[in-house]
Image (cartoon, rainbow, N blue to C red):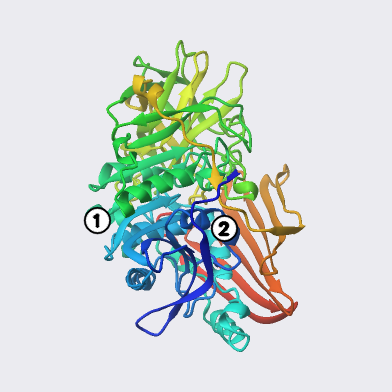
Amino acid sequence: MKIALGPLAITTIENMWIPLSDGTRLAAKIWLPEGAASNPVPAIIDYIPYRKRDGTAVGDELMFPYFAARGYASIRIDIRGTGDSDGLFEDEYVKQEQDDAVEAIEWITRQAWCSGSVGMIGISWGGFSALQVAARRPKGLKAIITHCSTDDRYADDAHYKGGCILNDTLVWGTSCFASMAQSPDPNIVGEERWRTMWVDRLENSRPTLIDWLTHQRRDDFWKHGSVCEDYGAIDCAVFAVGGWADGYSNAIFRLLSKLEGPRRGLIGPWGHKYPHQGVPGPAIGFLQECLRWWDHWLKGKDSGIMQEPMLRSWMLDWAEPAAHYDERPGHWLADPSWPSPHVESRVLHLGPGRLSEQALPDVALETSSLETVGIAGGDWCPYSLGGLGPLPLDQRWDDGGSLVFDSERLTGAAPILGAPVLELEITCDKPTAILAARLSDVSPSGEVTQVTYGLLNLSHRGGHDDLQPMEAGKSYRIQLAMNEIGYTFPSGHRIRLSVSTAYWPIAFPAPERATLTIQAWASRLRLPIRMHQPGDDELPAFDAPEGSAPMPTTMLTPGNLERFVRIDPISRQVTVTVKRDDGSMRLDPIGTVVGSKKHLIYSVAENDPRTARTEVCFRSELGRGAWQTAVEARTVMTATKSAFQLQIDFAAFETGERIFCKSWSKTIPRDLV
């Protein structure tokens, strides 16, 4: 990444208190361009709980001084009860969080250095915040950039997918509630106050994942904060960004198709990272694109960005299956709108082991997968070291336990852009079951590269808020949309559809092992074919990545990531173990040392979903001099046919001594999951 100095000198305010009407103060770090006090500038806000002082500081220093040196006040705010802000943390995306943001924006617009125009930017939680606050329409908010986020908290977040429980709800839930209870920094809140604040947080901390698992259908709990409930509430300009290797790519397409105001979309090959640091590459000059967006919407300059196509997307080319790619080959496309006039549907019919554009003989096909199908699926969202963890491996691991349908060898390339849709006529012998569908590329030499996948809890076939059990022997018409994707199947390769009744460890198993019967004659796969357009060749190239000078840091202990599978042939138990150690690093300007570890164990017997067990252990350390703190959490979930059983343990440490501990045991009835 090129370090690019801006035309303006900047002043950094390490901490400024933003007062709220109830007496709470939010902690903010501000980068101000020279002369802003006499010549007010627009403000750009990132509003998240991930600790401005020592959590996101390294990434913030690459981005916010860059904006400030080009004429924008850049502001990183810790939400209530996190980092150095007053108050107590409740849960993700609660109304109080939005109320506070609205107040903070109003306060910012009244400052002498602010022109009154405000933008919001954020990745993950910050992307959620930007959308949710935009729907509140605070005065002054003109535009947002939302990255790796979602418009639907139930259907497309880390908790549920297609009505199936994601193991990520345990992984994220464990680290979320523990890390939100970390200590504030004594240098910001005061030596006389930090410990009282910390103890208050510890005593009021609770694992909100209990609530997430209690609300198993799309009720009001999930509708709150889901901007898809009323897209019309958002009237500011929206720039939606993401990556194919991330867990949050689908929302971009819904936002482009449903929002009525000004909008643009950008999706590359990246994982859960900003595009200027994007892995897999190629990374792009994303901060320059942000400036073009801000210049247009916050300064009224004609940057040309709104004359460009609505959607820029990276069309992936084939690559051998691998857990990690430094780069993914491909090329950029441009579509004037979404849905795109350049995409047409191609129907492939299902037959015994075959996909064909021609109708195939009538046959009934059965599948009842081993519960371990899915171990080659990688992570739902790869967050790990370097910004990217395990991607799907060679799909032959999982195809052995699936119904597999292959096309003939392609005589020409078959590029797709959008969501492949599987339509099945099925019967099921259990009230509910998981339907997992994977689309893969079979190379001439036999490697099977996953392209995309989808999950559906069959009791959710009519929607996520009106569940209906399957009746044995009754035939149902099922539609499953897979994740949106841009990918070119090369000439000479085959297209493969794989169908299974399990997808472990991404999804927690259904209560019972089910058998699905598919009527092939009435089933089909619809592919969104997107052929090359002349305008694709006329796209201007993105600039190379730029950023401001990085924060000086010292790596004290290196990080490490291990993932291994253990198979016990006697008990038929399969265990997937992930050990992620982020190492420890000193943030040199403030002397704070940060470090974290995560240990995940997923186990299940091949033939019995009731043996499924997920264990998550998380530890985070934070300290400087005499201020040495740590938090630790452990979650274990098992299940019977009728209920989930949770055991959660939490502890906090000061200078190595345990000062707080609490445990929760909870039995949660299953609601057709």
Residue closest to the eye, 194 or 647 = 194
Farthest-out residue, bottom: 192
Rendered-image quadrant of the N terminus: top right
Rendered-image quadrant of the C terminus: bottom left
The correct choice, above or below, for 109 with respect to 17 in the image is above
* Residue at disc 2, secondary structure: helix
Density class for disc 1 (Cα within 10 Å; few <14, some 14-19, many ≥20) is: few
Farthest-out residue, right: 557
Relative to residue 128, is residue 616 drawn left or right?
A: right
Write the residue at 46% across / 18% down: 407
Q: Is residue 510 visible?
A: yes
In whole angstroms, how far apart are the C-alphas of marks 1 and 2?
35 Å
Mark 1 or 2, closer to the camera: 2
Of label 1 and label 2, which has the lower sequence position?
2
Residue 141 point in image, percent of width and height: 31, 60
Write the residue at 55% across / 35% down: 282
Write the residue at 50% across / 41% down: 285
Query: Disc 1 marks which residue?
Result: 230
Residue 142 point in image, percent of width and height: 30, 57
The correct choice, above or below, for 106 with respect to 156 in the image is below
**Residue 61 image label:** 2
Which amino acid does the dot numbered 1 rest on?
A: Asp
Density class for disc 2 (Cα within 10 Å; few <14, some 14-19, many ≥20) is: some
The correct choice, above or below, for 633 with respect to 373 in the image is below
Residue 6 point in image, percent of width and height: 51, 51
Residue 20 point in image, percent of width and height: 38, 79
**Residue 497 image label:** none
Which amino acid does the dot numbered 2 rest on?
A: Glu
Q: Is residue 467 visible?
A: no
Farthest-out residue, top: 411
Relative to residue 90, is residue 424 drawn left or right?
A: left
